Image: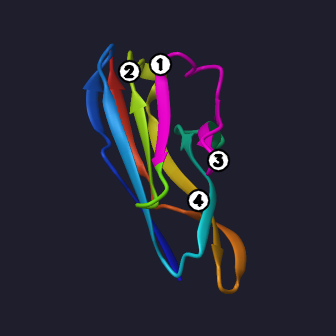
Amino acid sequence: QVQVVESGGGLVQAGGSLRLSCAASGSIVSINTMGWYRQAPGKQRELVATITRGGSTTYADSVKGRFTISRDNAKNTVLLKMNRLKPEDTAVYYCIATVATPRGVDAYWGQGTQVTVSS
């Protein structure tokens, strides 16, 4: 069993910053890619950023230059630093971790954390 838990969401004014954290725990052999997705009301869930175990990153065009993803492999955690936030960044942010357990490899999602950016 693997648990993925996010924290750090909240309300911020446009131009402000927030930091999201995510921790994976449980029967973990190793974690491959970790990342963040978001879903705004009435829209599909979309990729925000991902990071491999080796540190390679990808970002959605809409967040490049504003968001930074990082991870701590020893702690099974991933961070998302969000700067110069815009109202269109408002969404529920979900953490995902591709985890190898004794039973195999699967993707695990967190419950999500709300980020609201006021104009």
Where residue 74 sits: x, y (%)? 44, 60
Label 3 to label 4: alpha-carbon separation: 10 Å
Where residue 51 sits: x, y (%)? 60, 43
Residue extent of the magenta highlight:
49-71
Label for residue 97? 4
* Residue in front for this viewpoint, 58 or 45: 58
Earlier in the chain: of badge 2 and badge 3, it is 3
- Report which residue position mark 2 lands on: 83
- Report which residue position mark 3 lands on: 52
Q: Quadrant of the C terminus?
A: top left
Label for residue 9? none
Kind of residue sitting beneath label 4: Ala
Earlier in the chain: of badge 1 and badge 4, it is 1
Kind of residue sitting beneath label 1: Arg
Where residue 46 sits: x, y (%)? 65, 39
Where residue 21 sits: x, y (%)? 37, 48
